[in-house]
Amino acid sequence: MPTLIPTLQSKGKFSLNWSYLNAIANGVSAIDLGALALRNLHDARQFVREYGFDLDQPAAPRLILQAHAEAVEFICQNFLTPQQAALIPPDVRTPKDPLQLLVYASLRGQQVDLRRMWACAVLKVMHGIFYIDNNLKLRHFHAIRSQVFGSLDEVIRSDGEHYFLTDGEICLPLLHYDRKNNKGRNSILLKLLQKAAYLAADIFDHLGVRLVFATRFECLLALRALQRSHLLSVTNVDAGRTRNTLLDLDAAKIIFNKYRSRIAASEGYPCELLRQMDAELSEQAQPLTRCDNPHSGTGYNSVQVTVRKMIHVQQLDAAPEQDYDVGFFFEYEIQLMDADSYQRSLTGPASHDAYKKRQVDTARTRVFGRELQRWIAQHDAASV
């Protein structure tokens, strides 16, 4: 074993990559970096090994090539026009060795800056793809979906034409029942790329339901029904992700207490009484604007609850003495809306299409960086 001697001598110029070390020490997201810090292909191979790919295994280069091809296609389809897609340098679009992109993304200088920026953009998308493909929860998605909707199907019933929410006592008619069975791969990747955390584990709406009622007070009663059915409790709700821009509970409490005896004495379903209560709530409620999602449009009102559910899957390598299935928590969304809020969500700034456009704009800026975006815009202007 060679003797180790303390030294600061370096084969090349002794220097520090301040921006890269700042990102590591201060928690800058990888998607916001403008360059890597690799010197050559040897560095790139070490980087890939620590990232998680053993290049000596035949499957590893194939998986990297597949991710590269998917990343280029994603960028072309979501962020570029066909004319702009032709601007991607050939050695970035179809490299002989995808590992070379890591070196390209590390080189600075007038002659290589453009290639560096495009290489960084492709690598950022590849990073998101690898997180999706190696997320264990997504691999157990069939079991997750079955168990999540198994619980929801116990309280959301249908008579063949209409849906109802019931806790076994009260039964609330639904105007719309939207069930999100799975967030598409393209949508997951787009959401990853516009999030600072940049992790697949942080996507909370793979599964979920949206329940639309005629009035806001029925949304309040729906919360009660879900709570009494134990689908919602203080222990399984992610408090940090609860969003309420629909119900002023202080005002609703006053109005509910005023009308409670009339509700109890009603014959049949008290539609008009609930509308009357809603009208008073509109007059008395304070505006609710709490929303941490920068892409949500003005006028989008809902109660959005993220629920943790323990999912059980069979553990193939369980210890002999272990006689139970392994469990992990999965988070899904329950969203409540009234008819007026739902209608506003179909058009204008609060619509899903407008929301998706804002997401794409944010993701494009983060993947390309402002410098590459300016270069693309200048090239477009020059070609007109």
Image (cartoon, rainbow, N blue to C red):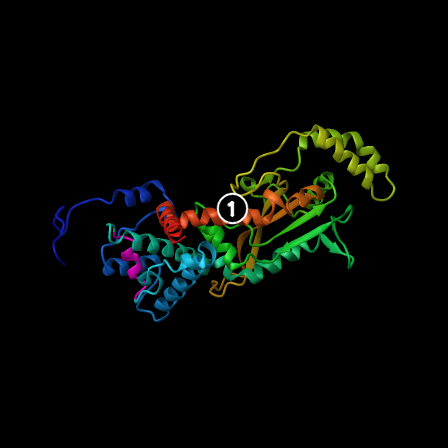
Quarter of the figure that contains the N terminus? bottom left
Residue 308 shows in the view: no
Which residue lies at the image location 83% right of the left edge and 44% below the top edge?
269
Residue 279 shows in the view: yes
Q: Residue furthest right?
A: 267
Q: Is residue 106 rendered magenta in the image?
A: yes
Q: Is residue 191 rendered magenta in the image?
A: no
Q: Position of residue 283 (x, y in %)?
A: 72, 29
Which residue lies at the image location 45% right of the left edge and 54% below the top edge?
79
Which sits in the foreground, 190 or 221?
190
Which segment is the magenta one? Answer: 97-107
Residue tagged 1 = 358
Q: Is residue 288 above or below residue 63?
A: above
How many numbered marks appear? 1
Q: Is residue 284 above or below residue 67?
A: above
Q: Position of residue 232 (x, y in %)?
A: 64, 45
Q: Amino acid at mark 1?
A: Arg
Q: Residue furthest bottom?
A: 58
Count residues near mark 1 (Cα–Cα under 10 Å), then give few for <14, some for 14-19, many for 20+.
some
Q: Residue furthest front?
A: 384
In the picture, measured across the screen, residue 104 lies left or right of residue 212, that is left
Q: Position of residue 178 (x, y in %)?
A: 66, 53
The answer to which image quadrant residue 85 occupies is: bottom left
Q: Is residue 169 above or below residue 52?
A: above
Q: Position of residue 272 (x, y in %)?
A: 82, 39
- Judging from the image, what secondary structure is the residue with disc 1 in? helix
In the picture, measured across the screen, residue 282 lies left or right of residue 4, that is right
